[in-house]
Amino acid sequence: MALSATTYPVTEQYRASFVEDWMGLYYFKMSNGMEYNCAFDPDCTAQDEFKANGTCTPDDKCHPNYAAGFDVKYVPGTLNGHGTNDYHKVGAIDKMFVSPVFSTAEMKLTKKDQDYNGATIDVWDLADLAFRNENCDGSEDDSRGIDCDSPYLTLNLGTFSSPKPNLVRTPIFASLPHFYQVEGSSSIKNWYPGDRVEIKSCSGSEECDDADRDFNCEMWTEPITGALLKGALKLQMNVMMPSVADTQSGKLSDEVLIPAVWVDEHQLAYPYQIDSIKQLQGAPGLFELVMWLGIGFGIVFLLCAGALFYFGWRRRRALRDLMLQKKPSGATELL
């Protein structure tokens, strides 16, 4: 079988499931079928080679950003993971794609075998994330900074257009609420927005005054199949304020991101789906019960067969002895 190169433009959005570190069903690696390609890197797009054929020569200014993980819709369980309990133990890490906001996210299993309306679930919390940024080193005029134009732990969502003149094409950046820094985050480091603004909680509404408001990104899964029973994504949308000149000193201020909106996206399984999960989880117990009952009946049948064989053997022996006693000898017949 011959293989030919694609005639379509190559991009980093192509996903190949057959990768060296393949971990199970629905495990992908962000790739483009080529060893090097930085289609979203300004250092790459500035090259004549890219303008000619869409490819990029690897050098110190153009580095592809690859990532691997499970599709977010298919959390690894016993069946679609390794076939073991690797993803059903406290501390297990599930690395997966979350699009379009994140490149990859790592969820950590913090609680296992929890009860939810009679169903057994595992609880995962956000452990790490890497936003969808290219590694631009900022060494050339065409580069826009360390990681293009997104500060640390944020993602440039583009601009928001408004009919009001002062809001036309306002840059919007996404981050975790309160610019939360996930411990050990693998996002490319640049300036951190949380160091440039003072974050104060709002007040005057039920949601703002709720001291126990949960900003945690988490998910609940069914251990055997990996079925997603609950997912919660919490984001903060920030408006970028460019540098302005100080009227007294004439110096330019730093760019800042000002929090504007909190986004709370979550989904919970319907009751009939929970009932299906309970039936699924009850099936192995039923099968195990049937198996042990079958083994028990088999042992009883073996014991009965042994008893029948033993008593049959004793009866045949007794009949044989009786026949030997009744059979006359030759001397008795002569008399």
Image (cartoon, rainbow, N blue to C red):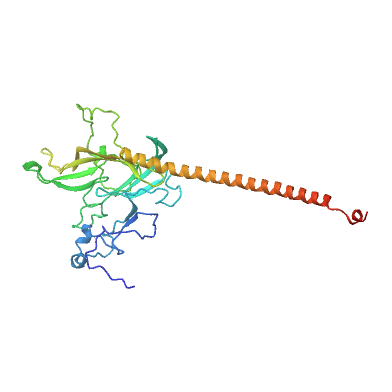
Q: Is residue 6 visible?
A: yes
As rendered, which of 255 and 277 lies closer to the eye?
A: 277
Q: Report the residue at 18% width, 57% height from top.
A: 142
Q: Which residue is outermost to the bottom?
A: 2
Instruction: Please tell me which residue lies in front, 273 or 149.
Output: 273
Up the image or down, 77 lies above or below 54; here it is above
Residue 180 percent across, percent down from the top left? 29, 39
| Residue nearest the viewer, comparing 62 with 254 | 62
> In percent of the image, x 67 and y 46: which residue is there?
307
The correct choice, above or below, for 291 with respect to 139 in the image is: above
* Residue 322 image position (x, y, % from top left): 80, 49
Residue 55 shown left or right of residue 90 in the figure:
left
Using the image, determine if residue 150 lies above or below residue 247. below
Is 44 left or right of 161, judged from the image as shown? Answer: right
Identify which residue is drawn at 77% across, 48% down: 318
**Where on the picture, by quarter, is residue 109?**
top left
- Evaluate whether residue 90 shows in this view: no
Tell which of 51 and 303 is nearer to you: 303
Q: Look at the image and tell me in which quarter the N terminus lies.
A: bottom left
Q: Position of residue 100 (x, y in %)?
A: 24, 49
Relative to 269, say whether 131 is above or below.
Answer: below
Q: Position of residue 23 (x, y in %)?
A: 40, 54
The quadrant where residue 264 appears? top left
The mark tally for this picture is 0
- Residue drawn at 18 percent across, 65 percent down: 51
